[in-house]
Image (cartoon, rainbow, N blue to C red):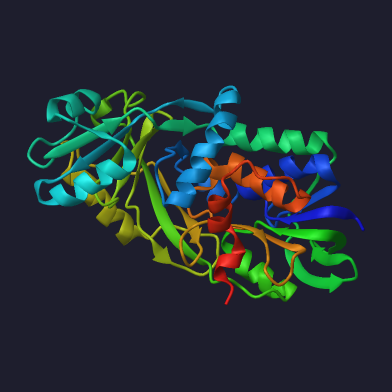
Amino acid sequence: MDADFLIIGGGIAGVSASARLAAHGKVVLVEAEKALAHHASGRSAALYEPRYGLPPVVGLSMASGDYFRAAEGVLSPRGLLVLGRADQADQFAHEAGDLGVERISFAQAQAMVPILNPDKVAMAAWAEHAWDIDTDLLLQGFAKTARAQGAEYHLGAPVTAIAKIAGGWRVTAGGQEITARLLVNAAGAWVDEVAKLAGVTPLGFQPNRRSMARIPAPGGHDVSKWPMIFGCGETWYAKPDAGALIVSPAEEHPMPPHDAWPDDMVLAEGLARYEEMVTEPVTRLITSWAGLRTFSPDRSLVIGRDTHAPDFVWLAGQGGYGFQTSAAASQLVADLITGAAPALEASLVAALSPRRFSA
């Protein structure tokens, strides 16, 4: 065999898994694009908000915290501000409880974000437990760890064929055949396509487009210390980014796997929802982009050996939580592969297992 572990996918999921597995055998990672993190991982809002998501996502995010805090420079303070209109009181209360944010006055919120519209912002809540993630530093840290232990990365190597062979798999990627005893499917929006190539039953993952726009700092303000801002109902969000502001309509539009691009009308509608809550209009865009957030049928990650093909391992369905869950998710997949006892609670491991989709 050319490798013990062949990982398909060079986003944060595959790269972090390569770092965890490299100490246990020969790792080869193949990625269709010519650079790591080209798709969803390269288009992330880059926030660590560990209370954001369904309970299994929150469990993984919380379990990733120690790793992030120990990695110098990966996290930096940001904070989270949630805003609501007068007609959103019930939903606002529910979301504030889920996110662990505390109600503050309009004046307190305006002190953080001076452009808030007093005629529209009826409710505000804030917490400090949200941090920016230096996604490139985190990704490259995992890659450096993997390569230092002999992992090989094959970039610009799209997978065109997968065959079951005695003792493992033969994968054709970038015109080269690679054999391995175990295959890790970390292909993002393409995970079901990879499964089909391998003759493994797809689990029903759905990629969803999310668009982003970068706009100039509103009113010439210094936005560097502004918090992440969520509109109630997650109908839009905004976040400081390199002296500017990124604004998203927070849409989830089902799409086939592809290199995503933003929809101008969806962006315009999302920017209008943002503009309603502030006093500074959007006069121009610096740039815009989109990514695919891929969810399993129950919207939680899928981590573990396939029920019917135990040498085919799923690391999939990150759904926009890939970076903030990466430390714990990658450790879990390595533990499940090597037979080590996971540090996570058994109920969480079961909630993430592919076996939950078995008939």
Q: Residue at x 37, y 46 (%)?
A: 213
Check the picture and name the quadrant holding the C terminus. bottom right
Relative to 154, say whether 168 is above or below: below
* Residue 163 position in % (x across, y down): 82, 72
Residue 83 picture quarter? top left
Q: Nearer the viewer, residue 20 or 198?
A: 20
* Residue 252 position in % (x across, y down): 38, 61
Left or right, 117 with respect to 34, comes to left
List the single residue furthest toward the left: 119
Relative to 281, say whether 53 is above or below: below
Left or right, 348 with respect to 94, comes to right
* Residue 308 position in % (x across, y down): 71, 72
Q: Residue at x 20, y 51 (%)?
A: 91
Relative to 88, say whether 254 is above or below: below
List the single residue furthest toward the front: 346
Q: Residue at x 87, y 61 (%)?
A: 179
Residue 124 picture quarter? top left
Relative to 171, say whether 230 is above or below: above
